[in-house]
Amino acid sequence: MTETRILWLTENYPPRRGGMAQACDRIVTNLRKNNVYTDVAFFNASAGNFKVVSQMNGKLIAVPVSDSPAHNLNILYNYITDPENKLKYTHIAAFGGTAPILALPVYKSWLGTKAVTLLRGNDFDIGIFQPNKRQVLFDAFKVSDAVCVLSEEVKTKVSSMFPDLNIVHISNGIDLDDWVQDPYDLEEALNFRHNNGISDDTILVGIFGQLKEKKGIVFFLENLLRTGLQEKITFLMVGDVEEQVQTWITEHSTEETGLKILQFPFMDRFELLSKYPACDFIALPSHYDGMPNVLLEAGALGIPVIAARTGGIFEVLPKEQSSLTFHPGNADQCRQAFNKAAALSLSERKNIGKALKDYIKENFNIKKESEAYLKLFNDSF
């Protein structure tokens, strides 16, 4: 049996920030831990020069990004095929972004490998409706031996267009041994509430991550104002905020509206261990989404979620959470979710949070995720 060796193409990898980079790192690390040799070709706008760094069971190949994707991909191909580098791959994996998906069909043909497209973030939701990206995406589908998706929703959408495609559903996972609060985190969470004047009667709703319009932030806040609950609910926002979202927040967070928002810049996920427990709920009001790491991180800590029923989000939520969800973009249901959340007692919130934590522990742990990716790449398709 031939040893599996993967060329992993991505635009999302540390030190780049965000959930996709975090997920990419997690998946690659676990493949390598299970002795699957994986070279990561990272198309990095911050990379000054083409650089190769040896890592455990693989290399990190930093590919500088120029105005010409064709130049970037040709430079990488030259390195891959240089006889002195002695590189031979069985699989190419395209994980998010334009360059990886553009490269996949050509590299597969030239290198004679299997090909796996891993759909993430905007690759499908936005790419499918952009003429210049749609054909690139379709070309990758046509040559892929497997297309990996995060949710049954996306699987259904893709299979309706490509019924003969081998579509594999692998949900995100979380390492519950690594993601643990200690007494210091809980103490800091209490101090945070106290220092920011958040009383026990105030409901703090956290919104974390890349705060873009697609995440439904403005829609969510607009509907909070329509409920009249702004005296009872305060928001904690942590992350990079899209300009148009920030403009709306600045214009509407006034004494006149009563909308209260505490804003902080992007934080490392482990810094958030003292911010999550300060919150009574976490919000995920996305118009469309994959399976956000924030959902698993908050849920694994037992914090209930107010969320849109979209992508992989709804698949992570147990039935106890259903009254706190709404169809994406449905204003009436969104306001109902706000009212339901505001009416819950502390014990009811804790029970919902515990149900979510137990459900994630059982169904979305890193062991299941790791085993699924090992099976994906070790199978002959």
Image (cartoon, rainbow, N blue to C red):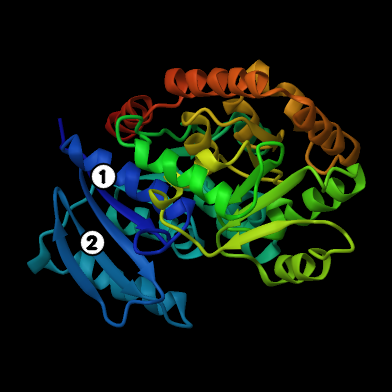
Please state, as top left, top right, bottom left or bottom right, where the C terminus lies in the image.
top left
Asked if one can make out residue 206 in the rendered structure from this viewpoint, the answer is: yes
**Front residue of this view, candidates 332 and 290:** 332
Q: Are marks 1 and 2 in contact (CB under 8 Å)?
A: no
Q: Residue at x 41, y 52 (%)?
A: 271
Q: Residue at x 56, y 17 (%)?
A: 355
Between discs 1 and 2, the one toward the N terminus: 1
Q: Residues within 10 Å of mark 2 (few under 14, many from 20)?
A: some
The amino acid pointed to by label 2 is Leu
C-alpha distance separating marks 1 and 2: 12 Å
- Residue 272 in percent (x, y) is at 45, 49
Please give the label number shown on residue 29: 1
The amino acid pointed to by label 1 is Thr
**Front residue of this view, candidates 234 and 249:** 234
- State the residue position of label 2: 60
**Front residue of this view, candidates 262 and 308:** 262
